Amino acid sequence: MIGSPPSRSFPISVIIPCFDQLAFTSQCIASLARHTRPPWELIVVDNGSTDGTACYLAGIRDVAPFPVTILTNAENRGFPAGCNQGIAAARGECVVLLNNDVVVTDGWLDQLVALTCVDPAIGMVGPMSNYTTPPQIILDTPYADLDQMDQFAVLWRQEHRGQWMFAEKLSGFCLLIQRRVLEAIGSLDERFGLGLFDDDDLALRAQRAGFKLAVAVDLFVHHHGSRTFAGAGIDAESLLATNRLRFEQKWGIDSSAAQAVSLVPWRNERLTPTPSGIRPATNSLRRTWAKLFGVGLPRTGTTSIASAMLELGLRTGHACFDETLFDVGDAFFDTPVYVDYPDLDRRYPGSKFILTWRDPHDWYRSFVRNLGPYLHRLRTEFNLDPDRLIDRRCYMHVFGTDELDEDTFLVRYRDHRFRVEEFFTKRPDDLLILDLDTTTDLWDPLYQFLNLPRPDRPFPRINASAIDRWLTLGHPLKLSNETERVVAEVL
């Protein structure tokens, strides 16, 4: 991530609370034994399992080449209480809270620890995964078994080496916490019972104490997801609602957007062990489309929507001038998409399209103020570079002139929407018309249209008064014109 991982002279304590689900627990511990470099210790909190977990753990303790501590409860005390028991017994300067249905990958712990060295204020670190909340989620992971998953993790690390980002919240499924954070804010709040919102609460307390949260973007671990709830027949939706209310009452804030992960287990028949009592997923949020293209004209909020796609975990480009980039990324906006969308639709069947829209007169004033001089330069200057030539082709295709006559531009503006709607007449489900003036919460239509988890942060409304505003956005999933050719070569 940031060079060679630092040598650890202190132990890391990995804490796994579990309740039944032996097949997942054994798979998790096997991955730890294979991929974790010493020194470290394993602490398993058995919350009253009745499926043979206790015998399995006793055997692991007897033969493991690393220290193993087993804490046993007579009943299921829940994830927060189990974690707190483990934290109390832990000897590490860092602890890692790990769900028992996680499969870690090579070098995982070194990468988490390395990120804490980037900024002394970083107190909590998490990885990317297939089943979690934004911004940690990776959509459409392609692997079909554990071997392929390991290969995917290696490729992901190579493609995103050194990338990380700050976050407002980290999911508790795989969470490294520095001891000094716990000493400052305390452990998990056990009022959240079996779990859910305990990690939101921990993140908020850490940030209010001055600590920062970070995501190791170049680290991927697999998460089966919600296995304990599913196997035990727990009503996760009811628990979520109850704990959301607890969280809101505790902090006096609205958390209506704070839960973005599906509560239905992730499912892959070849990858998933088959213990009894697992309910198959029937309605989990999964990406079902090929690519996403924004066909709205410039100055219709395309930068804001592109930024929102980054928050949804999509590799996103804005004003993409290199055709090879379309094979690499997930979502694309502005030039040349708003002109070339029929060709892109044929090139990437199964894609979805978003037409951003605003009041025509407001749009015209914004366009003239911000892009009028640029349009005139495209029309009149010679020796434009290749990227500017693409811009000129698209602008002139839509507007046909650089004379900023309001009546002409409004006719062209409305005509563009008519042509887009006409193109999708027989496929209305593939087109979302997003009115930025009348839609109060832009996340609602977006996550429903895309069938993706809703992020737990406000929609990024960006007033891109400068045409290069996209270039100043810092995000590891952003595909920009400075890096697009390099990224395409790497990927």
Image (cartoon, rainbow, N blue to C red):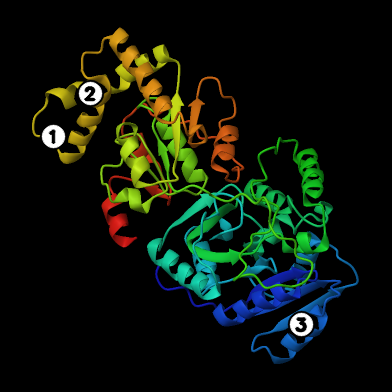
- Whether residue 38 is visible to the viewer of this picture, yes or no, is no
Residue 480, horizontal then vertical, whole percent: 33, 45
Is residue 113 rendered to the left or right of residue 424? right
Residue at x-position 75% and y-position 69%: 17
Depth order, front residue of 14/393: 393
Mark sitting on residue 215: none
Among numbered discs 2 and 3, the one appearing first in the sequence: 3
> Which quadrant of the structure image shows residue 357?
top left
Residue at x-position 83% and y-position 55%: 193
* Image quadrant in which the C terminus is located: bottom left
Depth order, front residue of 482/453: 453
Q: CA distance from mark 3 to mark 1?
A: 68 Å
Residue 386, horizontal then vertical, whole percent: 16, 40
Residue type, numbered disc 3: Leu
Question: Mark 2 touching mark 3, by CB under 8 A?
Answer: no
- Where does label 1 land, which residue? 384
Among numbered discs 3 and 1, the one appearing first in the sequence: 3
- Where does label 3 land, which residue? 57
Mark sitting on residue 375: 2
